[in-house]
Image: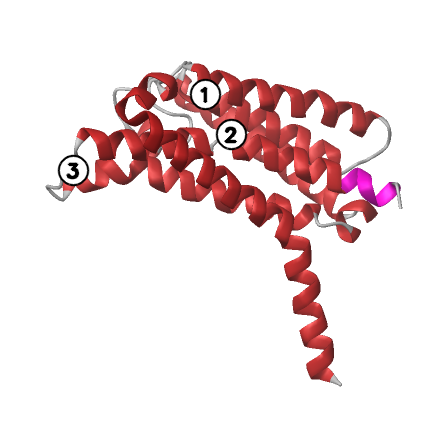
Amino acid sequence: MSAPVTQKGLSGLMSRALPALALIVGCLLVALAFSLVLGEQALALTREGGVIETLTVLLYAGVLVVALVVRARGEVAAGLIALAALLMGLRELDAHKTFTTYGLFKTRLYVSPDVPLTEKLLAGLAVAILLTLLVMAIRSAWRSRSLQQSAASITLLAVGGFGIFLKEMDGLPRQLRKMGVALQNDLMAISKAVEETGELGLPLLLALALWQLRSVNWR
């Protein structure tokens, strides 16, 4: 009896994860095609403050507004998606390093003697508030029937995993330079274009999770 149950459980898990996986693969394929077609010209579109980054921020803003509306209508788990969209959108705008000497989440900010003590304390307080809000949102969402019964929980995990993958990809050229390997301009353009264009998938995944939450109530 245990084997069929296990197989059924795995099949159900894969079926719930499929939409997020399909979206991630689709985003990467589109990003790769975009970078291969445009080559070095893709760097102009994927630069800081460029078209791709602006579109990504607008998508986060759209998800934030819709998630807040859904939360106001009683869907508790939508609050977590709204908070995620807000924080990720602010990070896309580099807000985490705009008001401090170093990035808000960089250890150097808190240990460097060049940073005033007041700045360290305020930065630490900001991080503590953000973490508290995040933990509260996760706890509230975890109790949500919609989150438990939908594929949204897996999609939100996919957001985290895909975000880590893109961050590692962003840092790959720097890591290679430290090892004495310099990427050619065309390869650098492809790497940057895939990473920046792939980031469009993050707000799309949040939107998918939001739709999956609502779809439970439509059954």
Is residue 138 rendered to the left or right of residue 39?
right
Main secondary structure along the magenta-highlighted residues: helix
Is residue 123 rendered to the left or right of residue 211?
left
Q: Which mark is residue 177?
A: 3
Question: Foreground residue, 6 or 147?
Answer: 6
**Residue at the spot of label 1:** 52
Q: Nearer the viewer, mark 3 or mark 1?
A: 1
Is residue 80 rendered to the left or right of residue 219?
left
Q: Secondary structure at mark 3?
A: helix
Circle 1: residue type: Ile
**Residue at the spot of label 2:** 200
Check contact, mark 2 vs mark 1: CB within 8 A.
yes
In the rendered image, the residue lying farthest to the bottom is 1
Q: What residue appears at the point 83 percent right and 25 percent down from the top-left corner?
A: 72
Which residues lie in the magenta part? 213-217
Q: Position of residue 217 (x, y in %)?
A: 87, 42
Magenta residue check for 206? no
Label 2, label 1: how many angstroms apart (C-alpha)? 8 Å
